[in-house]
Amino acid sequence: MILLRQLLGDVLRRLRVRQGRTLREVSTLARVSLGYLSEVERGQKEASSELLASICGALGVPLSQVLREVSDQFALAELQAAPVLADVPDRERLPLTETVSGTISDSVFPEVKDMVAA
């Protein structure tokens, strides 16, 4: 089973290491204990939204960027674990939301089209 906390920890660790920062440095800036941050990075603890915001602030990275990266990793892990659509009959699949021209279809998620147009 794919655990969100493990993927989140991997992304946070990768960002920290890429910046050449230590656990101690980030934990001090984020105002979280070194041990707890270590457990979050190892996927052993679930981080609250407040804690995530604090860690992202200490790393100088928007929380939205971290969540996007986690989402991408989660999608890849799901695809590697099992072909998600392999056993779903065509009649039960959701329609594609994008047309050939690259615009959002009027019939699918009209509220999204309105938000994009705004």
Image (spheres, rainbow, N blue to C red):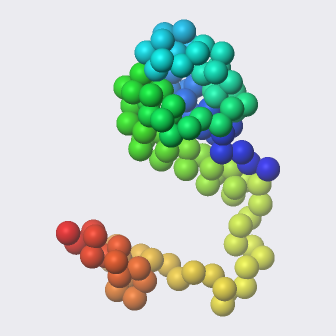
Residue displayed at 27% across by 76% down: 114
Above or below 109: residue 50: above
| 107 relative to 37, above or below | below
Q: Quadrant of the C terminus?
A: bottom left
Q: Is residue 21 visible?
A: no
Give the residue displayed 63% in from the left and 82% down from the top: 93
Q: Nearer the viewer, residue 47 or 110?
A: 47
Whether residue 68 sits left or right of residue 47 in the image: it is left
At a point 78% along the width and 76% down the height, the residue shown is: 87
Q: Position of residue 15 (x, y in %)?
A: 50, 26
Left or right: 67 in relation to 107: right
Left or right of residue 74: residue 100: left
Residue 35 is left or right of residue 81, and the answer is left
Taking the spot 58% from the left edge, 25% from the top edge, the residue there is 13
Question: Number of numbered discs present?
Answer: 0
**Image coords of residue 80 (percent x, y):** 73, 53
Nearer-the-camera pick, 115 or 97: 115
Q: Residue 46, relative to residue 68: is it above or below?
A: above
The quadrant in which residue 105 appears is bottom left
Find residue 24 and report its horizontal and vertical position in percent.
54, 9
Task: Give above or below for 52 relative to 87.
Answer: above
